[in-house]
Amino acid sequence: MAMQMGGKGLNSDINVTPLVDVMLVLLIIFMVITPMLQRGKAVQLPPTRQPEKQPDDGKDIVVSAQWLKKGAGFATMIYLGQDQVTEERLRTRLLDELRKDPGKSIYLKGDRRLNYGAVRKVMEICHEAGFQQVKLATEELKTEKTG
């Protein structure tokens, strides 16, 4: 708090500079941390009414199949975590991950704009690599309750 003594009497003003400094630091921290909270690539997940809740232990391997508009058609982009990979590279990296830790499981995020065959192909690559179970990511459909 700053006080100024002068001919007009006592004047007290609140110094907001430390408050602004703290708020800017918090803003920067949240801007850096927020993108790291999302695992895998951002895709539009298919909606479902009653999704089966799975615990997220952070050990799952996240594979994303993303829809990408390309000219008059579309393309399927495959990501392992945040890294774009080809089908062959996905297969070899999944084999390596399974050798390191046989207890890991796959979490597949398939874009809802993709056709079934494109997501199925990525799922088959996961099975060929040796993963017996592939968890599919969905988005809970929000239903409005009346009454």
Image (spheres, rainbow, N blue to C red):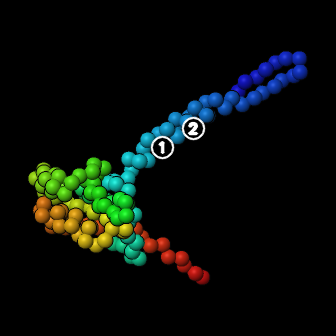
Query: Among all residues in the image, which is located at the extreme top?
Result: 6
Residue drawn at x 21%, y 54% as measured from the top left? 86
**From the viewer's perspective, is 5 left or right of 58?**
right
Viewer-nearest residue: 8 or 71: 71
Q: Quadrant of the C terminus?
A: bottom right
Query: Among all residues in the image, which is located at the extreme right?
Result: 8
Viewer-nearest residue: 114 or 70: 70
- The residues bearing labels 1 and 2 have C-alpha atoms spaced at a distance of 11 Å
Residue drawn at x 81%, y 25% as measured from the top left? 11
Marking on residue 78: none
Q: Amino acid at mark 2?
A: Met
The quadrant holding residue 7 is top right
Marking on residue 23: 2
Say what secondary structure mark 2 lies in: helix
| Relative vertical location of residue 83 with respect to residue 14 in this rendering, above or below | below
- Residue 24 position, x and y percent, is 55, 36
Residue highlighted by disc 1 = 30
- Residue 51 position, x and y percent, is 36, 73
The 10 Å Cα crowd at callout 2, few under 14, some 14 to 19, many 20 or more, is few
